[in-house]
Image (spheres, rainbow, N blue to C red):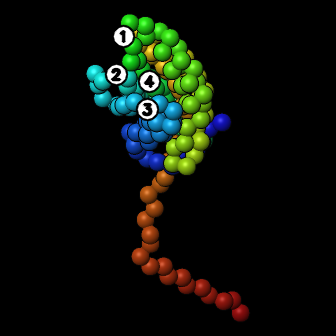
């Protein structure tokens, strides 16, 4: 399921998807959610690691976005169990996110635990419709002749 989003600004679209991810996380987790690095525990860090556009028919583009969500757990001594629990919740929370009133479906999700931190990867695809600039005409005139 792909949502059709209307925008000409690629960076704006990525920020709107990040906002949708943040809103989904805020429903379940009571911790800091940021797009910049933080040292507080626990917290989530969200970043877009890859974004590609592929030309489709007419003025449409298929935008594929891969996001990484890092989770720094509370526990420093036994972080794995907390990371496993967070990964399980993320699978359900991020299956669908809302962006500009449109539901986007995650098409690929995976997780790994490295150095006591959860690295969760999720992909969202959407069709982007390029809006054309239209110039209004100043005036129009018409001349007709009737035969016979």
Q: Secondary structure at mark 2?
A: loop
Disc 4/disc 2 C-alpha distance (Å): 15 Å
Quarter occupied by the C terminus: bottom right
- Give the image location of residue 36, x and y in percent: 30, 29
- Image point (62%, 87%), residue name: 145
- The residue under label 2 is 41
Q: Residues within 10 Å of mark 4 (few under 14, many from 20)?
A: many
Q: Dot 1: what SS? A: loop
Do labels 3 and 1 touch, CB within 8 Å? Answer: no
**Residue at position x 49%, y 52% in the image:** 131
Q: Nearer the viewer, mark 3 or mark 4?
A: 3
> How far apart, in angstroms, are the residues tagged by discs 3 and 2?
11 Å
| 102 or 64, nearer to the observer | 102
In this view of the protein, which residue sits in the foreground, 3 or 121? 121
Q: Residue at x 44, y 72 (%)?
A: 137
Q: Residues within 10 Å of mark 2 (few under 14, many from 20)?
A: some
**Could you say whether the residue bearing mark 4 is in a helix, strand or loop?**
strand
Whole-number angstrom distance, CA of label 3 to CA of label 4: 16 Å
User: Separation of disc 1 and disc 2 at Cα?
Assistant: 9 Å
Discs 4/2, front? 2
Residue 33 percent coordinates (x, y): 38, 31
Dot 1 corresponds to which residue? 76
Horizontal arrangement in the rendering, residue 95 relative to residue 135 (left or right): right
Give the Cα separation between the discs numbered 4 and 1.
19 Å
Q: Are marks 1 and 2 in contact (CB under 8 Å)?
A: yes
Q: Which is more N-terminal, label 1 or label 3?
A: 3
Q: Residue at x 47, y 30 (%)?
A: 29
Return the x and y of residue 112 as percentages of the image width and height.
49, 11
């Amino acid at each position: 399921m792909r949502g059709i989003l209307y925008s000409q600004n690629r960076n704006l679209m990525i920020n709107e998807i990040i906002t949708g991810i943040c809103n989904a996380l805020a429903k379940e987790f009571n911790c800091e959610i940021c797009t910049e690095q933080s040292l507080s525990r626990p917290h989530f860090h969200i970043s877009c690691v890859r974004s590609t556009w592929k030309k489709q028919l007419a003025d449409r583009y298929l935008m594929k976005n891969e996001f990484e969500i890092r989770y720094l757990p509370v526990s420093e001594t036994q972080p794995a169990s907390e990371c496993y629990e967070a990964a399980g919740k993320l699978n359900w929370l991020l299956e669908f996110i809302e962006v500009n009133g449109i539901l986007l479906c995650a098409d690929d999700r995976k997780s790994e635990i490295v150095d006591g931190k959860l690295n969760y990867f999720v992909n969202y695809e959407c069709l982007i419709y390029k809006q054309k600039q239209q110039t209004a005409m100043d005036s129009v005139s018409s001349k007709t002749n009737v035969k016979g």
